[in-house]
Image (spheres, rainbow, N blue to C red):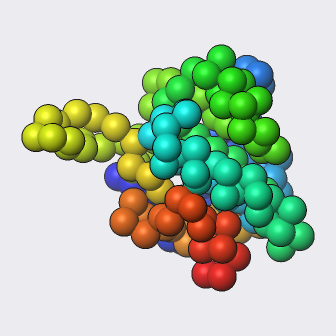
Amino acid sequence: MALQIGDKAPEILGVDQNGKEVKLSQFKGKKLVLYFYPKDNTSGCTAQACSLRDGYKELQAAGYEVLGVSKDSEKSHQGFITKQELPFNLIADTNTTLQQEFGVWAEKSMYGRKYMGTLRTTFIINEDGIIENILGPKEVKTKDHTNQILNK
């Protein structure tokens, strides 16, 4: 069952690009932009990460912290962060545990082929760890994601 608006987000979020465990309680008192994306170094995912990078100071000024999640490995995340100069951490959810918990690991289809993949989705979690907004796959504007979050 996917997490919904009003639900408490899980305490254990996974491990970041440096192998460090990331917990929800580390963000207490801040709003968290937890965004799930399909793959490092692809056009849409890069556009989304760069929008969040470019608006990071504005997001922080509004009380937000940013955390990205994909199935990619810690090593892949390290390269993506370095290449795109990302100021926030990325969770390596290689076994899709967190994606399944949030309900964003689902069947997709491309060119008639069905496969399991990540639905590009952003969860806005309030200071108390409660999900207060969800931007689903059809709503996320990768190139203007920061403004979407700030003007929700």
Number of callouts:
0
Closer to us: 98 or 39: 39
- Tell me if I can see residue 116 in this picture: yes
| Figure check: 99 above or below 5 | above
Q: Position of residue 56 (x, y in %)?
A: 80, 59
Residue drawn 22% across the image and 33% down it: 115
| Image quadrant where one finds the C terminus | bottom right
Q: Depth check: 29 or 119 in front?
A: 119
Q: Which residue lies at the image location 61% right of the left edge and 22% below the top edge? A: 76
Name which residue lies at 67% across and 51% down.
Answer: 50
Query: Is 102 above or below relative to 58?
Result: above
Residue 72: x percent and y percent? 53, 26
At which x and y percent is residue 145?
60, 65
Q: Residue furthest bottom?
A: 151
In this rendering, does residue 7 appear at all? no
Asked whether, in this view, residue 144 is left or right of residue 39, the answer is right
Q: Give above or below for 78 relative to 54.
A: above
Image-based side of 39 in relation to 63, left or right: left
Residue, far top: 75
- Please state the horizontal and vertical placement of residue 93, each as a whole percent of the image: 54, 30
Give the quarter of the image for residue 55: bottom right
Residue found at x 55% / y 33%: 40
Q: Residue furthest left?
A: 112
